[in-house]
Image (cartoon, grey):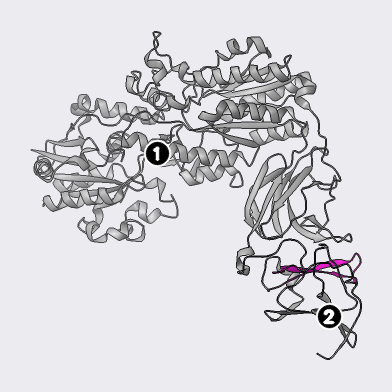
Amino acid sequence: MSAMPLSLLDLSHLMTIEPAIDFLNVLDLRTEPVSLLRLFRRPCYANGVWLQQLSHQSEDEIILQLEGALAILYTDPKTLPGWQQRLQVYQSGSRHWIQVQGTSYIVSGQALSAGDPQQSTCSTQLQLQGQQEIRIPETNLPVQFKVQIPESKSLRTLQIKGYNPFFSLPAPQWFRLPHSLPAGITQLELDIQPASDGQEHWQLRHTATGFSIPALTQAPLGHKLLKEQGRLALILDRTCPDADAWSAARQVLLTPQIPQSVLPPSFHAQEDPFQIGDLNRQIRQTLAEGLQAFFQNHLPQVQIELAWFADSPQPHLAHPGHLTLPHKAANLLLPQALPNLRQSMEQITYAPGLDIWDPLELALSELVDSFERHQTWAPVLIVGNSPPNPPELNPQSPFFQLLQKTHTTFRRPWQMGSGRSFPELLNKLEKQGVPVVYLFLYGHRPLLKDERENRFYQAFEDHQREVESLLRQYLKVVPCAFSSFAGTLQQVLYELLQPVVSAVKILPEQVRV
Amino acid sequence: MQKLIQIWGETQVGKTTLLSSALFAEPEALPWIDRARSSDILTKLQQHWQQLRMNQLAPGTAEDLVDTQLFLHPNPADLESIVLRDMRGGDVRKLKEVEIHQRIEQADGILFLVAWDGQDLVRQIHAMETVIAHFHQPFRFLCLHKAEQALNPTRDAQAWQGQGGWWRHYQPWKDYCRLLERFAEDAILPTSAYGYDPHHPERPACLLGEFGNYLPYNVQPINVARPLAWFMKSWTGL
C-alpha cells in the first residue's frame, strides 16, 4: 500500500496504553448523523454488521478501507501513548485507509480477555420489561420479538435492559410505542446503535415499517390504581388444593371413603370429621393473613372484592355421585373490609376439580361486570393453578397447543354460559389500565408412595408447567411454591401497589435472533 | 361347551372399558350373545359402560379374576357360552412363569391389550412374549388400544379398517414385527373405547383431567366389538 499519512487524528489526549485491546471505535464522518463503526481485533465477533468493512490481514494488523474522511473516536481516556506509531491513516487517490498495527490496540470499553472469539457470541443477556418481564439469557443482537400492543395509549411503554460480559451495553432504557401503531400483535427489532454523541444507545424499531421507537428520557410515572381506588380484586381458584392435600383431592373424585393415608398430616389430629372443603384451608388462611398483614401497613381502608371459580355440575360432564359440587361455576362476594376478610374467605372452600379447564373467565367476567357497573376498577390478583376454559377450537389460540399435545378435546364453551372470552376480558381490563396478576401455585406433594400415584403426579406437574407457560401469553404470571407462598404474596401485593406503567405484553415464544 | 378368553393387559390399559364398550356400544355387532340369559352377569359391565357414557371414569379392576359369562344363541359349533376372564392389570408384571402357565392353560383364547401410549411398553411387550411362549393355541388377538391417541380418523382410515399388516406402517409396532407376526393377519386391530369427539371429529373424545388423568367425553368407541367377533367366528364360523 503506497499512501501518505493523513493527519486527521488528534491523538494528543491519549494517556496510557491498555494491553489486550478488544475493539476500536471509528466514527465515520461521512454520514449524517455520523455513524460508529466498531473494529474488532479478530474477525467474527458478535454483531457482524460492524465487521463488514473490516479487512483482516494478520493477527496484529487490521486495515480498514473506507471512502471519504475518517476520524477516530476515543471513548476511554485511558488509551495508549505512542498510539501514533501503530495507527495511521493513509490516502490513496480518493480513498482513505486506516491501519492499525501491533499486538495491542485501542480500548473502548472492556478488554476481551477470552482468546476464543466464539466465546463472545450469544453472550448478550436481555431483560424486556412490559406488563411482564421476559429474560433472554443468551443471544446476539439484533433480536426480534413480538409484543401485544394494548389499546391504552398511556401504558405502551417498554423497558430494555442488557448485560454482556465482554462488551459494555447501554444503560437501561424506557421506550414508548407510538399511538400510530394499532393495538394488537406486532414485531419489534432491538439493536444497539451509536449516536452522534459517540455513545451507544438501544435502538428499537417497528419491524414492518422500520420506524424507530422513541426512547423516553425518564421512567414513566404510571398511575397508582390500587391506592387511588382503595380496592383489590381477588379471584380464588377453588379447585386448587393445599400442598399436602393433593392425594386426598385426587382420591375424593374416585371414592367417598378417603383413606387416612392420603389425608394431610394436619387432619390426623383434628377431632372434627374430615370435610372435602378443608382441602384448601392452608391457602385460604395464608391469603387472609397475608392480605391483612400487608394492607394494615400500607392501605388499612382497602376493600377486597372476593371472587371464586370452581367446577359445577354440567350436563355433559357428570361428576361422581358421591360428590357435591357448587351450584354456580363462579361467584362474586360483596366487597370486604380487612377485619371481615378471614371470615369471608372461609366460605371459599375447596371444590373438586374434574377436568383441567376451569371457569376462570366466568369469575373474571363477574368482576368486570361489577367494575363496569360501578365504574371503579381495581387491580386483579388470581390465586390458584387452573387455566380458563379454552375460548374456542382455534389453532392460533395458545391453549389449543395443550389440546394438541395431550390429544384431548374440551367442553363446549357455550355450555359454560360464558359471554365474554378470557382474552376479551383481559383486553377490557387492559384498556382501563388494570393490572392482572396470576399467582400460580406449585409444589403439591403426593402422599401416597406408589408408582401409580407418582405417575399421575408427574403427569399433573407436567401439565401445570404447560398451563403456566400458556397463561404467560395472556397475563403476568408469578409462579410460586407453597413453601414461599406467604412471601411471594407480599411481593406481588407490593408490586400491585406500585404505579402501573405498562400493559405491553411480550410474547415469550416469539423471540428470535 | 364353553370357551374361556383370558384378557391380558397392563394396569390402566383399558381392559374393562374395552369389554364394556364391546358389549354395549354396538350390541348389534355381537348378535350371537343371548343377552336375556346373560343379563345378570352383564350388570357390572353395563354399569361400567353407563359411567363411560356419563363421561365418568370407572374404577379399575380390583379383584384378581373377574369372569363374565356370555351365553350364546344356538350355533353350529354347539358353543353354549364364552367366559371373558378379566384380571388385575398389575398382575401382568407380578406373575411368575409358572403362574402364567397355569392361568393360560385354562384359556382357549387370549385377548391381549397394549395401549398405544402405554407406560413401560418394553415391559408390556416382554410380558406378552412370555405368554405367547407358553400359549400354543392359535386363538390370540391383539388390540393396540387407545388408538385414538395416535391415529387420525380420516388419514389413518385404512389402519382403522384393520387392513392386513396395517401396523407395519406405525411406530412403535414396526419395531416389534417378529412378535406381532405371531398373530394372524386379521388378529391385530387398532381399538378405541373413546373414539373421537362428535363435535370435533379430529379430536379424541377425552378431556384432560384435573390430576393428570384422562376423562371420557362423548365417547364413540371404534372397533371394540371386533375382537370378540373374531373369536366367535374362529370357533363357530358365525
In the image shown, does A104 or B174 lie closer to the viewer?
A: A104
Give me the residue at 34% from left, 52% from top: B161
- In this rendering, position of residue B170 left or right of residue A310: left
Subunit bearing disc 1: B
- In this rendering, position of residue A2 left or right of residue A459: right
Subunit bearing disc 2: A
Give me the residue at 64% from left, 18% from top: A293
Q: Dot 2: what SS?
A: strand
Label 1 sits on residue: B220
Label 2, label 1: how far apart the Cα atoms are: 82 Å
On the image, the x and y values in percent for residue A94 come to 90, 85
Q: Is residue B137 visible?
A: no
Q: Is residue B157 above or below residue A349?
A: below
List the single residue furthest toward the top.
Answer: A271
Q: Is residue B54 above or below residue B231?
A: above
Q: Quadrant of the C terminus of chain A?
A: bottom right
> Which residue type carries mark 1?
Gln
Q: Is residue A13 visible?
A: yes
Label 2 sits on residue: A88
In the image shown, does B33 or A219 lie closer to the viewer?
A: A219
> Which residue type carries mark 2?
Gln
- In this rendering, position of residue A301 left or right of residue A3: left
The answer to if A118 sits in the magenta stretch is no
Give me the residue at 44% from left, 55% from top: B155
